[in-house]
Each structure stands twice: as C-alpha cells, then as structure tokens.
Image (cartoon, rainbow, N blue to C red):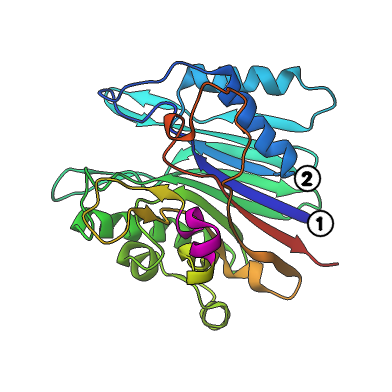
Amino acid sequence: MDLKFAWWNCGLSPPSTKAKKKEPNLGFAISIITLLEDREVDVLGICEVNEQDIDLINNIIESLENTDLKLVNLYKKQGNSIEDFCLIYNSKKLSITSYGESLNAWDTVTDKKLKAGISANFILNDNVPLSLILCHWQSRKSYPHESPQRIKLGVRLRTNVDEILSNNGNSLIVILGDFNDEPFDKPIQDHLSASRDAAFVLRKPRSLFNPFWSCLGSMDEIKHHPRSSGSCYFQDDGNMTHWKTFDQILFSSAFLQPNWQFIDKGAEIINDIPIQDVDLAWNEISDHYPILSHIRRIA
C-alpha cells in the first residue's frame, strides 16, 4: 500500500484577527483539488484557511464524481486565538476515528501561548492505527529565531509524541507542519528530537525521522531548480538566504522498519502546481509551496 502525505500553508487566511484576509477564490480552491488528484495524495493538511475557504473547498470535493476524498474542518476561533487548519483524506485507505484535540499549552512563566498543534487519529484499511498531528507554530515575528518560546514549542510537541509512544513504542506517527523553523534549528532537531539520520532513529526509536533535510538544496539542485532550496520565501529574515525549509513532514521510527519504504527520499517540494486563475501570480497566492512525502508499505 502506498501512502502520500502532503502539507500546504496556502496563505488564504492567516491566523490573526489583524491580518488581511483574501477573498475565497474558486480558481485557487480548484488548484488544491488538482494537487490532490494529480499527485494522488492520501492525506493533505492545510493551514491559513478560515471557514469560508473550507466551505468552498468542501463544496468542490462534494461535487466530484466517484471521489473517496473527505474533508475534516479543524478551524476554531476563540477570541484572538485561531486554529487555522483543515484536513482532506482518502477514505478508501484510511478511516478517521477522532480529531480536533488541541496540543497547545500556555507558558506558565510568561503566559504566552504555545501553539504546538492539533491531532487526528486514523485507522488504515487493515486496522493499523495512525496518529496525525498538524502544526502551525508561531511566526518568527511573534517568537524570534532561537527565542525561549520556540524552544518550548519543540518541548511541548515532544511531550505529546512521548504520550503516544508510551502507549505503543511502535506507533505510526506523522507530523505535518509549518514550523517557522528549519530542520537544523534547535526546536526541531534537539527538542522535538527529529533527526535526518535513519540509522540513529532506528537505534533510538523514540526519536523522529525528518526526511526534509534533503530539501535544503545541493548546489546542483539550486542551479537547475532554484526554488527547490526551500519551501517558503521569508523576506523579513536578515540572514544570508530568504528561502527556508519551514514546511516539513516528520515520521516516527516505525516507518523505518523493513515493512515500510520511503519513495524518492520521502521529501518533495511541489513547485509546479497549475494555477487555475490566470489573473493570479504565485506570490499573490502564498509564500509557501506544498510539500509531499511518499511512503510504501511492503507486503
């Protein structure tokens, strides 16, 4: 069985009461469905959407003939706090058992919110459980690079992962997110314990595997595919590159067992989606590209 997980910070409705919202756009919504169908995606996590955006996407899905796609609305707004997610999945391969549990917390010292993520639980078509977590960590404008709050975001999400693994050390866990941190940053690598080293993860099975180190970009990749050196164009950063690999998909060590195989490194930045509205340039849609991980279970 093949499973394709994708993630997209689509930028339609940023999770801030002060942010400028974009009008729901039919052409853009169709582009999301095009991504699902052309790439045969089984699970797509989306952030920076509101209820209008989600309704528009769902209406398109429901209008499709013979589709197995189902949408889960994870959007929540309480005062100035916004959870800006939705989830689309292939009901032929997965059944959803629960969703919407917040993994967020408040910093007990500073009283700042730690938006660690939101969870959903599935069962694969052969009754194997799968835990999914969607993340959209605060921006570097809110919590600067290497600030204590960013470290605490990694610690908080690590606590949630440990709770799952304490019940079953071989749990299938997939984390999709825009972390506003790169794979080598301390919140991801050190405090969430997500490694690029598959052999290390197999020796230390409570750690996570992060295939998106491969998307940082070799010189050859950057020469032939300039935008493959990151998933997000981060204009406000003063460092030496604007392209950041903020969007990542992380896997528990169970996916490194011999009965699973990562296809094409398990990490892809998708920068060739046809936009269905010719009046829109890409930078008017989002400053992020979608990402995809393809894994295969071997009989």
Disc sitting over residue 257 in the figure: none
Indicate the position of residue 78 as horizontal and vertical percent values.
Answer: 33, 24
Q: Residues within 10 Å of mark 1 (few under 14, many from 20)?
A: few
Where residue 270 appears, as percent x and y from the top left, is: 59, 48
Residue at 45 percent of width and 23 percent of height: 50
> Which element carries disc 2, helix, strand or loop?
loop
Of the numbered discs 1 and 2, the one sitting upstream in the chain is: 1
Residue 166 visible within the image: no
What is the tally of numbered marks visible in this picture? 2
Query: Would you name the residue on which mark 2 appears?
Result: 93
Quadrant of image for the N terminus: bottom right
Identify the magenta region. 221-230
Mainly helix, strand or loop, the magenta region?
A: helix
Q: Marks 1 and 2, how far apart in space?
A: 9 Å
**Is 212 on the left or on the right of 93, as rendered?**
left
Answer with left or right where residue 152 lies relative to residue 1.
left
Where residue 196 sits: x, y (%)? 50, 73
Q: Is residue 246 above or below residue 207?
A: above
Looking at the image, residue 19 sits to the left or right of residue 68; the answer is left
Q: Nearer the viewer, residue 270 or 298?
A: 270
Residue type of the residue flagged with mark 1: Met
Q: Position of residue 290 (x, y in %)?
A: 54, 45
Image quarter for residue 93?
top right
Q: Name the residue under label 1.
A: 1
Query: Which amino acid is tagged 2?
Result: Lys
The outermost residue toward the left is 110
Residue visible at 51% across and 66% down in the picture = 210
Circle 2: is it few (<14), some (14-19), or many (20+) Cα within 10 Å? some
Residue 41, by quadrant, is top right
Q: Do the residues labelled 1 and 2 touch (CB within 8 Å)?
A: yes
Q: Does the magenta stretch include residue 222?
A: yes
